[in-house]
Amino acid sequence: QKSKLPFKVQGGITVKELGCLLVEKEGIVAFHTPSSLIPIGFKSEWMDSATGLVYECEVQDGQDVFEDPKPAYQVSVQVGGKLRNVVTTSMVESWKSVQASQTKHGTAEEKAAAEGWDAAKLEGRFGLTAKEVRKRLEGL
C-alpha cells in the first residue's frame, strides 16, 4: 500500500516525499541506526508561524554532495529576499546554520524569530523523528 503524500505531522511539518532506504550500499551504515532510519530523498517543509517563512528540508546521499558516505541534510529558505541553502552532515548543524544566516541577513521579524528558536527542537524540524514518519518509513 502506497502512502499518500504529502501529509502533515506535529510541529507544522509537511512531509512531501518519504525517499528510499539505502540498506544495500556496501560498507555504509550511516543511513540507519538501531533507533532511526534516514531515507535518501526524504523531503519535508516546516512553516514558521511567526514569519510565514517556509523551510524546505531534504536528505541527500552525502557521497554525491561531500564525497562522504554519510547523509547530507539540506535546508533551503528565502530569507531577506534571497535564497539561503545550507547542506551539512547533521540535521542540527543544518538548522543552526540557517538560524545564523537568518539572524544575520533576515528582516527584523525574521531575525527575532530565529533568535527565539529552541535549539533542542531543531532536529525535529526535518520531520524524521515524528512518530507517523517513523511508522511509514518502517513500511518501506
Image (cartoon, grey):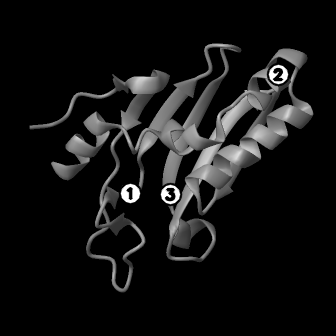
At horizontal 42% and vertical 72% (from top left) the residue drawn is 30
Residue 71, relative to residue 97: is it above or below?
A: below
Q: Which residue is mark 3?
A: 60
- CA gap between label 2 and label 3 equals 30 Å
> Mark 2 belongs to which amino acid?
Ala
> Mark 3 belongs to which amino acid?
Gln
Residue 87: assigned label: none
Task: Give the total of numbered labels.
Answer: 3
Residue 112: assigned label: 2
At horizontal 33% and vertical 84% (from top left) the residue drawn is 26
Circle 2: element type: helix
Residue 48, relative to residue 32: is it above or below?
A: above
Residue 77, relative to residue 100: is it above or below?
A: above
Task: Identify which residue, 125 or 67, lies in the foreground.
Answer: 125
> On the image, which quarter does residue 89 sit in?
bottom right
Circle 1: element type: loop
Residue 81: tell me if it is visible. Answer: no
At horizontal 43% and vertical 38% (from top left) the residue drawn is 127
Q: Residues within 10 Å of mark 2 (few under 14, many from 20)?
A: some
Circle 3: element type: strand
Which of the two labelled residues, at mark 1 and mark 3, occupies the earlier sequence position?
Answer: 1
